[in-house]
Image (tube, rainbow, N blue to C red):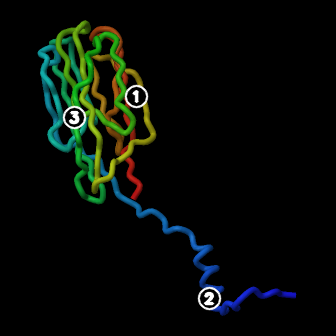
Amino acid sequence: MMRTYGKALSVVAVAAALSAATMAAPASAAVTIKVEQVSTRSVWESTGTQVTCPPNQVLTGRSHSGDERGQTIYYCSRILINGEQVEVHSGDWTSPQRESRADYSAPNNQVIAGRWHKGDENGDTRYRTAALYWQGRQVTLIDGDTSGEYTESSHNWQAKAGKVMTGRMHYGDENGKTWYRSATVYFEG
């Protein structure tokens, strides 16, 4: 026996209410993300040259040859979401770390946009981080990864496709080991 309370609902109204209650929220729109190397900068490591990627670019690689008088090449990339440039908002330089025992990771959802080193392995190293924005919303980073080890005096490291540099570790002199941290650029559309 069915009880009725107040006015009866039409079959159409009941069907519409059930349909609205059981519909799933629309899926997030997929976005296409591309990390594209567009510039390099070569410096003599020991001179204390501040290297910051050009506007709206971030570090995605580094190579070094020789001791502290050797040459370092920085690889900078732009990030595109659906073909549109991501904005890079660079922050201040970090406090110095001694290069011979440097271990740096950018804060969550920030990338490295620059590095500054002066002297030999006893000299100071600093990093410049940046936040990423697209259409006024912050871009996030996921799937953090640490590279294998490289001998500092003879290596070329570049982040895997879709990844950006988020940190670096180095122990010892030019014959010591260097590792890089990277993460995947992600945006929930």
| Amino acid beneath label 1 | Ser
85 is higher (above) or lower (below) than 74: below
Q: Which mark is residue 13?
A: 2
Q: What's under tag 3, amino acid-wise?
A: Tyr
Residue 168 placement: quadrant: top left
Task: Give how far across and how far down residue 135 sits, in percent.
Answer: 28, 56
Instruction: Point out the image quarter for the C terminus.
Output: bottom left
Q: Are marks 3 and 2 in contact (CB under 8 Å)?
A: no
Q: Extreme front residue here?
A: 6
Mark with earlier residue (2, 1): 2
- From the image, state whether disc 3 or disc 2 is nearer to you: 2
Local secondary structure at mark 3: strand
Q: Which residue is mark 1?
A: 147
Q: Quadrant of the N terminus?
A: bottom right
Circle 1: element type: loop
Q: Which mark is residue 75?
A: 3
Q: Position of residue 153 (x, y in %)?
A: 26, 15
